[in-house]
Amino acid sequence: MKRIYYFTIALSALFILQSCDQDLPENEAITIASEGGALSVGSSLGYVVGSEGPTTSRASFIQGDVKTTKVEVYKSFESPTDTTKSDEILFRTFDISEQGEGAQVVIDLPFDYQDLAEGLTLDKGSLPDEDSGLNIGDFWTLRYVSTTSNGTIVENSVSTKVSVSTRFAGKYAVNTGVYYRIGVLRDDVAFPDEMTIESVDATTYRIVDYFGAFEGNELFFQIDADGIITYPENKPNGDAQVGNGEPLITCTSSPNNMTNVPCGASESNFVQQDDVNGEDVLFMTFGYLTAGSGPREFYQVLEKIVD
């Protein structure tokens, strides 16, 4: 699908040209438009794993004496984690029908994961069927090539790097923090006001420095495509997950020891996504078991802080 919008505003056209390079004097900016083929594009863009809507890359240019008649976008993929690269193939072609001098042409290129992955061949295997198999740090490169009315082929000096990112990394306010020690509510043990969540891979996250109310720890968890939160038995390095040095327990692995905190499917361990403001809310229940003593149970509600 392609959408091309046209705006014929002479004053704003000159401004946009100058914004491509703020150091260019006015006469050089006009020369770029006259020669044709120069695009203004974003150099970086995030692809959020699990996003339902399309991601959109945008390019724009001003028609000058020499017109831009076609824009081709090429794509390639690279994974620094797996040290693998793909070939480069043609992604989209835009034939430009607006030829009025001074017209601003804006090209929107919406895409999803299947669009990005389709047709690419890696030197090591292939891209995963689903975006959950991507690594943080993987990226696509979108390269732009223009054809002008005098037959010149122009490769744009700026390409777009589409980097794999995750939705749920960031800082969170602790809206609710509940801790039970051997069945006794401990209101005297305070949770922090904020927690930081880091991405480990496309579906795995780490709470930095905290396991419930206790600092000096960490907690790894996973969020699937349906927004369900689970807790792997082992850390990414293979070590067993622990809290304060004791074995992790969850509503699934040890339900008899998790009786004082919410454990139902509709009560906890899920994400309430906010697609309007981005203030996603995580409902989490987990704990640890101290041998010879008893369970420590935690329930927390975290709300993403949006700057």
Image (cartoon, rainbow, N blue to C red):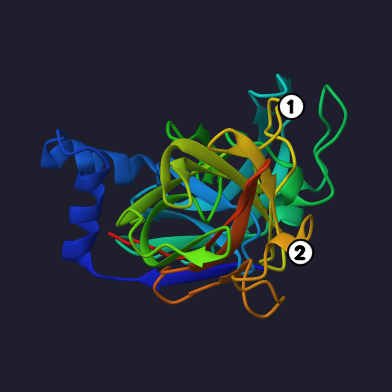
Q: Position of residue 234 (x, y in %)?
A: 73, 36
Left or right of 160: which side holds 92? right
Q: Which residue is mark 1?
A: 238
Left or right of 70: which side holds 82? right
User: In this orientation, does residue 143 appear?
Assistant: yes
Residue that protrudes farthest toward the left in the picture: 25
Q: Position of residue 229 (x, y in %)?
A: 66, 60
Q: Residue at x 34, y 71 (%)?
A: 7
Q: Callout 1 environment at 10 Å: few (<14), some (14 to 19), or many (20+)?
A: few
- In the picture shown, does residue 198 fall above or below 102? above
Q: Residue at x 25, y 48 (%)?
A: 17
Secondary structure at badge 1 equals loop
- Give the Cα distance between marks 2 and 1: 24 Å
Q: Position of residue 33 (x, y in %)?
A: 31, 46
Q: Nearer the viewer, mark 2 or mark 1?
A: 2
Callout 2, which amino acid?
Answer: Pro
Q: Residue at x 24, y 59 (%)?
A: 13
Residue 255, numbered circle: 2
Q: Nearer the viewer, residue 234 or 55?
A: 234
